[in-house]
Image (cartoon, grey):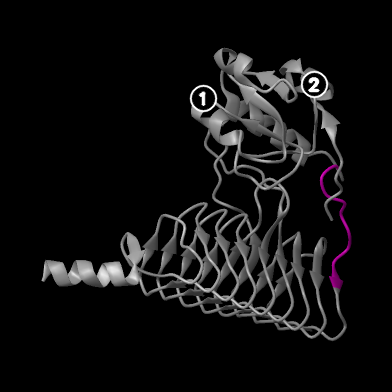
Amino acid sequence: MFTGNTVTLSDLAGPLELDVRRDAAIAYVGKVPTRLDQRLVPCGKQAHLNEAAGQSGIAAYVVPEGLAPEVASEAGLVVSAEPAATAMRVHEYLAALPNFQWADFDTRIDPTAVISPGAHVAPRNVVIGARSVIGPNAVLLERSIIGADCEIGPGTVVGGEAFEQCPGAAPKRILRQTGGVLIEDWVTIQALGTIVRATFGGFTRVRRETKMDAHVHVAHDCQIGERVTITACAEISGRVEIGDDAYLGPNCTISNGVRIGRKATITIGSVVVRDVPDGIRVTGNFALPHENWLNLIRAYR
């Protein structure tokens, strides 16, 4: 599991050739909106620093020379002409340190769990709780924690890599990722779903009693509440938050970082690019409050 270990920027300066102007202890690298404490974040523009001012958990920044005076004096500071590439280099270095961010363990499967023929369960860093059923040809990769009384449908993949490309890498490649997936009790994920692990640390999380239809994709770092209903072919992009008892209709698309409120309804085929308040029903591409959408259609006709 995650260790909470930290390392100082000064300790990283030598092996990674970092221009450290102010020291700080970090546990992770992340982006400005990443939900991790003690993190190092890249900020290439003033707008990024402005956004970061409203965020918690940031211990240090990587910025270009011109932005160095704008970084808060209590934060660690690394200067780089390519902040994103430098930060991701730090991330991959930390990811490669044995048992630094995560302490490995042998996979633990409750004796009452059912593992169907053809299912793959990684031999390390997986937990499967009591009475959970892992369907035929399902895949549970490392750092996947499954609670009690869950159903993981045929062909579903839990713990796959996020589609996060490594900035500055040549040839292009996917960033090394270090987070996991946490699925709480009584969750059902039907056939051919994908639940992607968190990118920089922590968990993509699905809370109790949530039910997912077939062909649902949940991207990195999503936080899905209790008793949520997600129907077939829903696409949920990274860092989305979904409140308790929300309903997502077939073929809807939820953009990165959007918050869907408690008891909100997303109707069939909607494309959601902004936050949806609690209890609101939205419709359309791009999604509007349902009554507004109906009025728009009436006016068009």
Q: Is residue 104 visible?
A: yes
Tell me if residue 106 is in the magenta stretch: yes
Q: Secondary structure at mark 2?
A: loop
Residue 290: percent from the left, percent from the top?
Answer: 33, 71
Q: Nearer the viewer, residue 85 or 185?
A: 185
Three-letter amino acid code at the position of disc 1: Gln
Q: Which residue is mark 2?
A: 23
Q: Which residue is mark 1?
A: 46
Residue 202: percent from the left, percent from the top?
Answer: 73, 52
Image check: 132 left or right of 252?
right
Residue found 85% across the figure and 45% down from its top: 4
Badge 1 local density, few (<14 within 10 Å), some, or many (20+)? some
Badge 2 local density, few (<14 within 10 Å), some, or many (20+)? some
**Quadrant, the C terminus:** bottom left
Q: Which residues are magenta?
A: 100-108
Provide the major secondary structure of the magenta segment. Answer: loop
Q: Nearer the viewer, residue 229 or 214?
A: 229
**Quadrant, the N terminus:** bottom right
Image check: 215 left or right of 152?
left
Q: Which mark is residue 286?
A: none
Q: Secondary structure at mark 1?
A: helix
Three-letter amino acid code at the position of disc 2: Asp
* 26 up-or-down from 212: above or below: above
Residue found 62% across the figure and 78% down from its top: 227
Residue found 67% across the figure and 70% down from its top: 139
